[in-house]
Amino acid sequence: MDGQERRRFMMWKRDQGVRPTPGREGTVAPATPPPAGGPAATSAALGPESESRRHMDKDVVNIGKSVVIKGELNGSEDLTIEGHVEGKIELRDHVLTIGPNGKTKAEVFAKVVIVLGDVRGNIVASEKVDIRDNGSVDGDIAAPRVAIAEGAHFRGSVDMQKKVEPPRPAPQAETKSAAPAPAPAAPKPLV
Amino acid sequence: MPGSSDGRVRDISDLLSRLGLRRPTSAQDLPAASSSDFEEPAYASKALKKFIACLSTRPAPVLIDLGPVVGSNIAFFGEQLGCKIYVEDLCADFERHEREGTLDQFPELLKSRFRQDDESVDGVLCWDVFDHLDQASARAVATELTRVIRPNGALLGFFRTIAVGASHYTRYVVVDAENLRHRPYGTAHGRQGVLQNRDIIKLFAGLRVSDSFLLQSNVREILFRRPEYLSFGSR
């Protein structure tokens, strides 16, 4: 316990050295955010005003205009791309924004994807895909909610599949007994 | 004198209804979209309801939309009907080829334009795309659509019955199962001409006309269905 606490404390100190002001209460550990993105990330992604607030409140990583990345991009924080990314982008629990200058030629996996720039490749979002005015997507979208603005360009397919429930750890026997009408002739696995 | 302004309003609304034009009458008819939509009139569609009914009987329908992408249509068909939607904006392709001066290659390219498997699609929304295509392109598209559509699948098309010099495309926005909003958007390319009934039927030779409505706005709405027997080796 002591060792863990000390380690956390050391990480906090180190991070404090890199990023001088996290902007919020110091209780939030900035180095490794929790695996599931807070609700703030989702709600903030939906409006331009709240989006800018998010930028102020929270650390959002930016890939600048002149940056070109080829390969696999993984992360556990919100990301804005203004540059050029080719390959695969994976931000499973976070918001990915392709800025007006951003161009991606990649398979994208994220919680929320906001497109203001150009995306070529398939997008899989666990929550929402939002293609804004002048945003362009050439690829297939799989997300429970999809919003496409009138001036946006889109070519591909949209699949608003049902939300995939996380696998339950419950034992097999239990799920069988929970079935509403068990077949009378089938041999009972229990008892 | 007695109720002259009321009479005039009634006359105008009669005229509108005779033209096949209907204003939303209740709050229920109004879309949940932006406030600018409230000014736009809604046009009644007779075939759309039947088309939607065809889709709603399918468990996870696959839909092709040949028009430009409309966010609210995606929400309507995706969320309410659970469709997987392919957006294949043919007019945009047509425009691009015209700009690049490669229109002569367009019909040939259309033969490989649709990536869907044979008999894999439950519904096709053609809107008025065929009014804008030349004969060769129209034939290529119709052949491809007949290939991909499933037995009992439905295809909805709007065909103008008189030559109007409209030099714009129309974005069809689904308000509800019976009403559409027409949003014109610019183009350098007008309508190609009027397709006669027999030409339309010939174009979709593999499909049968399920319903046909001639609206007072001089638009023929045709709902095609693919006969079931075609899938059992009769082709």
Image (spheres, grey):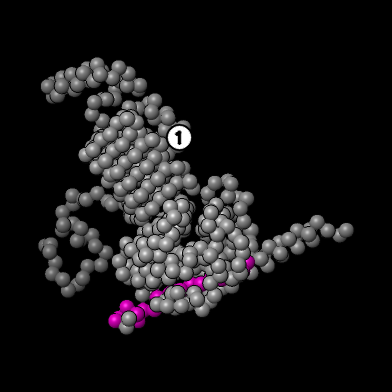
Query: Quick one: A108 or A12, which is closer to the camera?
Result: A108
Based on the displayed image, in which of its 4 quarters is residue A116 positioned?
top left
A96 lies above or below B50: above
Q: Residue A183 lies in what quarter of the image?
A: bottom left
For mark 1, name the chain. Answer: A
Is residue B4 positioned above or below B231 on the image? above
Residue B163 visible? The answer is yes
Quick one: which residue is furthest to the right in this view?
A: B1
Write down the region rendered in magenta.
Answer: B217-233
Q: Which residue lies under the disc numbered 1?
A: A48
The three-letter amino acid code for the residue at tag 1 is Pro
Residue at image position (40%, 65%) is B107
Say which of A72 and B29 sits in front. A72
Is A62 drawn above or below residue A189 in the view shown?
above
Say how many tags the image has: 1
Using the image as rendered, state which of residue B122 and residue A27 is in the foreground.
B122
Q: Answer with the quarter of the image where residue A66 lies.
A: top left
Task: Residue B115: say if magenta.
Answer: no
**Residue depicted at x 40% and y 68%:** B140
Front in this rendered view, residue B213 or A139: A139
Residue B227 in the magenta stretch? The answer is yes
In the image, what residue occupies the spot 24% across and 62% down?
A: A179
Left/right of residue B184 with respect to residue B229 in the rendered view: right
Question: Which residue does the image show at 53% across and 65% down from the upper left?
Answer: B192
